[in-house]
Image (spheres, rainbow, N blue to C red):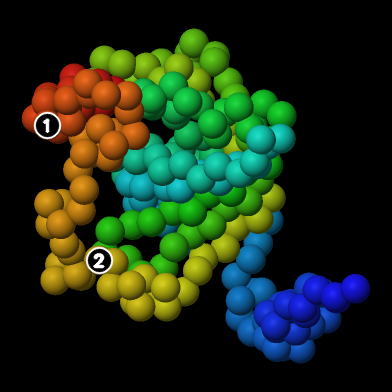
Amino acid sequence: MDRPSPDPAASHRITTLDELEKIYGDPVQRSLDKEIDHISDHYRAFIEAAPFVVVATSGPEGLDCSPRGDPPGFVRVVDGKTVMLPDRRGNNRIDSLRNLVRDPRVSLLFLIPGIGETLRINGRAEISVDPALCQSFEMQGKLPRSVLVITVERTYFQCQKALARSRLWQADAQIPRSALPSTGTILKALAESGFDGEAYDAGYPEHMKMTIY
């Protein structure tokens, strides 16, 4: 009986922490020093300057990573252990919220245009629909349907290397939107026949203006 051929890639896979640590060694001490269990005054300055944050969650159906954006300061620092994040109008998939109902663990990654460092928060989130709280996050006459109230467990900043390598904030690194398939083109390929991708693209700027909040 023929034996299955060995997987040539198997000998190169890392499957234990010991194997991993032999390759990477010990973490740089400064990378440990910058991690704290609260929001310091310096870290608060980063949060309040950020107009964009990525929210990562985990649930029974899997993982989710969702972008959130608003004017700087939209993530409210309540105190050294608490931040609040309004849930603005979206596509109603609410994947992040579905996850948080079952698993409150959450991770936030803050980005600030022109700044190389990013800031990370790990913690636990509750979903609040308190009317007064939602009212306090009003924008253009519209209220969020809910607000994430996040208890901070770990806060630390990430150095500039990733953004420097990607040249994310460099003007000459930008590409025109027309260089990639349009949203209408993608939806037409995925949807049932009869979907008008060109009409969707033409109407989307007005649609976004009417539904952004």
Question: What residue do we see at 64% from left, 84% from top?
Answer: 28
Q: Three-letter amino acid code at disc 2?
A: Trp
Is residue 94 left or right of 72 when viewed as pictured? right
> Residue 161 appears in which quarter of the rendering?
bottom left
Q: Name the residue under label 1.
A: 198
Vertical side of 126 occupied by 72: above or below:
below
Viewer-side residue, 144 vs 44:
144
Callout 1 crowding tier (Cα within 10 Å): few <14, some 14–19, many ≥20: some
Which label is found at residue 38? none
Callout 2 crowding tier (Cα within 10 Å): few <14, some 14–19, many ≥20: some
Residue at the outermost right position: 1
Q: Quadrant of the N terminus?
A: bottom right
Vertical side of 40 occupied by 22: above or below:
below
Residue 136 appears in the rendering = no
Question: What residue do we see at 34% from left, 40% from top?
Answer: 69
Is residue 179 left or right of 78 when viewed as pictured? left
Residue at the outermost left position: 202
Pointers 2 and 1 in contact (C-beta within 8 Å): no
Q: Name the residue under label 2.
A: 169
Residue at the outermost front position: 1
Residue 9 in the image: state x and y as whole percent. Answer: 68, 80
**Of pointers 2 and 1, the one earlier in the residue sequence:** 2
Is residue 138 left or right of 150 when viewed as pictured? left
Question: What residue do we see at 44% from left, 63% from top?
Answer: 118
Residue 211 in the image: state x and y as whole percent. Answer: 25, 21
Is residue 173 left or right of 119 when viewed as pictured? left
> Residue 62 appears in which quarter of the rendering?
top right
Residue 151 in the image: state x and y as whole percent. Answer: 65, 40
Residue 64 in the image: state x and y as whole percent. Answer: 55, 42
Question: What residue do we see at 35% from left, 51% from top?
Answer: 49
Q: Three-letter amino acid code at disc 1?
A: Glu
